[in-house]
Image (cartoon, rainbow, N blue to C red):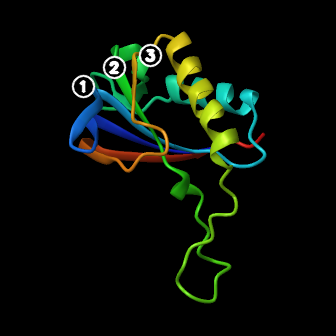
Amino acid sequence: MRAVVQRVSSASVRVEGETVGACGRGLLVLVGVRHEDTSETAARLAAKIARLRIFENEEGRFDRSILDIGGEALVVSQFTLLADARRQKGTRPDFSQAAPKEQAEPLYERFCEELRALGVPVATGSFGAYMEVEIVNDGPVTIVLDVEP
């Protein structure tokens, strides 16, 4: 699985003009699922993100996790994270690494469940929908994480 984690002051996601998920201070997590990903992959990614120390302590050092600050997460599925533009002779990305919806959606849901089980309040987008994501990036701080099966 691949995740792009952005530290945010706030974030929201809309589908057809209606807000379906939002969070305050915490993380926006964009998640892409590969063919070879498993439930274990989802659990490991959730644990890594819950404990990722990208919030500042009193000295201004990255030493706190979302759990430490009592933050929230907005998790949005995004298969385009798995785009590969290196192999194409033209300019169209190759999305063949992305798992099909039937496989990806349950693993996305498992990731969200695991994050909640670790104590992180989680809001979500709408899997497979066209979404508009609005964020106030804090820092900005953006981390790309890859967890292999």
The residue at the point 30 percent across, 45 percent down is: 133
Disc 1 marks which amino acid? Gly
Q: Secondary structure at mark 3?
A: loop
Residue 9 to residue 132: above or below:
above
Q: CA distance from mark 1 to mark 3?
A: 12 Å
Residue 117 to residue 46: above or below:
above
Disc 2 marks which amino acid? Gly
Q: CA distance from mark 2 to mark 1?
A: 7 Å
In the rendering, which numbered label is found on residue 120?
Answer: 3
Disc 1 or 3, which lies upstream in sequence? 1
In the rendering, which numbered label is found on residue 71?
Answer: 2
In the picture, residue 36 is in which quadrant?
top right
Mark 2 in CB contact with mark 3 (< 8 angstroms): yes
Q: Secondary structure at mark 1?
A: loop
The residue at the point 69 percent across, 49 percent down is: 34
**Label 1 sits on residue:** 24
Asked whether residue 9 appears in the rendered view, the answer is no
Disc 2 or 1, which lies upstream in sequence? 1
Q: Where's residue 42, x and y in %?
A: 66, 30
Mark 2 in CB contact with mark 1 (< 8 angstroms): yes
